[in-house]
Amino acid sequence: MSKLLEVTGLHASYGDFRVLHGLDFSVEKGGISTLLGANGAGKTTTLRALCGMIKRSGTIRYDGNDIGSKATEEIVRMGVAHVPEGRGTFTGLTTEENLECGAMTRSSRAEIARDMEQVYHWFPRLRERRAQQAGTLSGGEQQMLAIARALMLRPRLMLLDEPSFGLAPMIVQEMFSILRKVNEEEDVAMLIVEQNAGVVLELADTAFVLETGGIVMSGTAAEIRDNETIRAAYLGY
Amino acid sequence: MELLAQQLITGIATGGIYACMALAVVMIYQAIHHLNFAQGEMAMFSTFIAWQMLAWGVPYWLVIPLTVVVSFAGGVAIERLVIRPLGDAPVLSHIVVFIGLFAIINSLAGFIWDFTIKPFPSPFGEGSQFGGLISNHQIGMIAVTMTVLVMLFLFFQYTRVGLAMRAAAENPASARLVGIRVGWMIALGWGMAAAIGAVAGILIAPIVFLEPNMMLSILLYGFAGAVLGGLTSPTGAVFGGFMVGIIENLAGTYIPEIGGELKLPIALFLIVTVLVFKPTGLFGRTVVQRV
Amino acid sequence: MSANTTTTADGQAPAKQGVSLPQPAAATSNAKIMRTAGVILLAIGIAAPFLSGNFLIFQLTMMMIYAIAILGLNILTGINGQFSLGHGAFYAVGAYTAAIMMDQFGIGYLWTLPVAGIICFVVGFLFGLPALRLEGVYLALATFALAVVTPQLFKLSPFEHWTSGVMGIVISKPDAPFGLPLNPDQWLYFLTFAIGLLAYVCARNLVGSRTGRALMAIRDNPIAAGSMGVNTPLFKSLAFGVSALYTGVAGALGAIVVQYISPDSFTFTLSVALVVGLVVGGVGWLPGALFGGAFIMFVPNIAEELSKGLSGAVYGLIMILMMYAIPTGLGGLLKAALTALSKRSMNR
Ligand SMILES: Nc1ncnc2c1ncn2[C@@H]1O[C@H](COP(=O)(O)OP(=O)(O)OP(=O)(O)O)[C@@H](O)[C@H]1O
Ligand SMILES: [Mg+2]
């Protein structure tokens, strides 16, 4: 297997405040990696750095290209969809307009319509609320919308920041099975940040554990899952 | 009764101009969260360009689209060259840059075309309809502004670029995350605002005559309209513009104390009153938002 | 949206840094530099009218008058965080107060200054009341409207008996009192100089006082200030009043020095010039007012030298370039320079 995303020596800072101190990690083509760590470890920052939302340095190779100095919108146009922390809903637009925005970089109207049907099929709640102003959706509905909007890009790589945030346990299961389906059927690679380490380790093939801006542990998801010490020290479950 | 009808029509006709200026102001405000104090001067300059082309003998039906295109390009250029390099400099620095822009455009127009007042022919000719109730130019003003406004509404509501512009204005960070080139959307907004201003300038010039300072009070009425409707609502701004036009004319006619000389202070009064009692404007809704 | 404040007040910024820096020597030397600069400026200021022609003296006097007006605007914007694009209105009220008192009632020019100040304080305070509900760009908008409307207001026919409408009022130039060996221009220069100095000292004391701290607290965090028991509405209106007082006194002086006023002396260009002066000098840095005054007095002349027909465009271009180069004005530049300096001496 070859790597879709390969990151070496990733540094990032907010102004003068340095948060990431040289991370190395990767995502296989069609694979799922997960980034675990305590609150404030720098997981969100890592995802932001990957798609150029904050100042960063180091090499970020995506699909053979160096995207370390590309603008966010250009990275997205290369097929990287980011479900941000806080969902990033366009609150003043309707649900459907939000989804259309997700497909903004694509041109085939027919394909977009088909994918719209598909995400409505996966998230029937969104179909019910299609004409509603997205800012008035419930928190969980907005989370579904964020994931659905990312899918509308037809991405090759998805960066998911706590996709289960605010979702009811049953919906979480459903959402992860949707992600699994997308991963298997569409060959979409994923980098998932999750508090829900138990669930995501079932899904992922590789895991990286982050602590105060550095990677302290990495391995296959199974290794991390089965290692009592790591679980107790870093994942707390 | 006849007087009332006439004043209402005049109000709607000039109100359309204010609506255009208000819309231009709101479009830029939504994109960059600053008020473009040079909006009026940009429109004035566009009008001079139209005048120049007419003087060269270019037919009217060609002058208007050409002016709109040139103004659009000018608006984009100003955004790219002047505003963008400012980045997120403080509000007051932006205000100073707008003042500088104001001075440059005003001085340039005076330099090229001098400061004497010039008559500007109406594209709709002289004459009037319905026994003098409404002049041809007024009919034209109402028709053109309505067309422009409806077209803009359709553009924003039903095209992908329109949607992208709305998304970029509302949440630039999220817009980037779906691959929208936010910088270009802002430039596009500037271009469109300049083009709308050009239409407004051409339509009002036959009434106020052409000179470099012609747009200052028009811009103020535009601001009043924008405030009345809510700076965050393009539709509201349009309604606000029409309402300011109507209020201005009716008050000027029926309240003798106001007459001609207090017309401009009405705009001030409207702005302050609306802002004080209803800061979001009559139509600006505070977006219901869950955090 | 908050004002682009650079420093709290002159002298305070370096002094404050001194507290937080491990080596206070750097800060003291900064304060020393500032004090030396102040003394030199004072000396130049006293010598200038004996070394220059009457027209230059007139220009320098106008520069100081603008500086006083900008100082007032700085109290409002820099210290209290409220915008005004309409301070030309208060300048006009001050100017008309002085002119009408002298023209209609034959009152001595010196008496017009405190009266203009008091009237403008009241007018400013009253304008500050509705302004309480406005913030940032909205306040800028409302005051911009005020600026555009100002000349119209002074043209109104009901007031024509007082204002002489568009004709304006001519004032005669006062001579130096007590047989001082000064010509009228020199006398007005020194009068303005003294008032300017007084205004500056008062402003500094205001900034250092409890009231000043309350004003700055409101600027930095209105909600916190409110919860700390600061009467926010009162202080914000007060800031408007005091600010208008300064600008009104400047307007009265301006009327006396120029010897003529009419509604079109106070177009929105004046209001806008004051804002430009404020920003160029540095929002929140009180001595910046002097540099701002110099900018709006002399740079248009320089622009005229550069290109007669396009002087407005050149002036506008200079303004824009200034904002690219020093978006926080001279005050911001100075602060950055001092910080760099003290950092360097710290590393030594
Ligand atoms: N905009 C910002 N400005 C300054 N510091 C920030 C900013 N955003 C995050 N930080 C800091 O960076 C560090 C990492 O934050 P980050 O959001 O990446 O954590 P996280 O791992 O995503 O945590 P969580 O699980 O709570 O979401 C934290 O110490 C945080 O305080
Ligand atoms: Mg996070």
Image (tube, coloured by chain):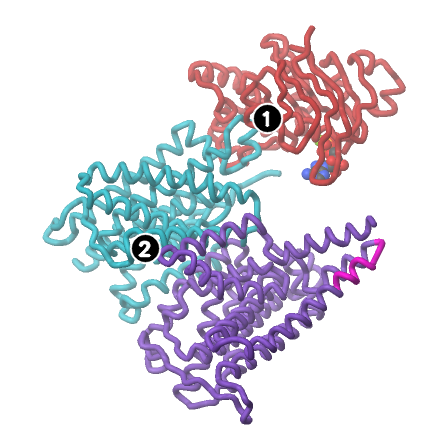
Chain colours: A red, B cyan, C purple
Q: CA distance from mark 2 to mark 1?
A: 44 Å
Displayed-image quarter of ligand 1: top right
Q: Position of residue B168 (x, y in %)?
A: 50, 34
Residue at the far bottom: name it.
C178
C28 is within the stretch colored magenta: yes
C267 is within the stretch colored magenta: no
Instruction: From the viewer's perspective, tell me whether residue C205 is left or right of residue B153.
Output: right
B193 or C48, which is in the foreground? C48
Magenta stretch bounds: C22-31
Quadrant where the N terminus of chain A is found in the figure: top right
Say which quarter of the image contains residue B273: bottom left
Residue C201, relative to residue A54: is it above or below?
below
Residue at x-position 45% and y-position 69% = C89
Crowding at mark 2 (Cα within 10 Å: few <14, some 14-19, many 20+): some
Give SS at disc 2: helix
Instruction: Give, as a three-letter code, the residue at label 2.
Output: Gly
Residue at x-position 57% and y-position 22% = A150
Residue with the mark numbered 2: B110
Residue at x-position 47% and y-position 33% = B184
- Report whether residue A187 is seen: yes
Say which quarter of the image contains residue C206: bottom right
Residue at x-position 50% and y-position 33% = B182
In the rendering, which numbered label is found on residue B100? none
Q: Position of residue C253 (x, y in %)?
A: 49, 78
Residue at the far top: name it.
A1
Q: Chain of mark 2?
A: B
Q: Position of residue B13 (x, y in %)?
A: 25, 50
In the rendering, which numbered label is found on residue A70? 1
Instruction: Give, as a three-letter code, the residue at label 1.
Output: Lys
Q: Main secondary structure of the magenta part?
A: helix
Crowding at mark 1 (Cα within 10 Å: few <14, some 14-19, many 20+): few
Give SS at disc 1: loop
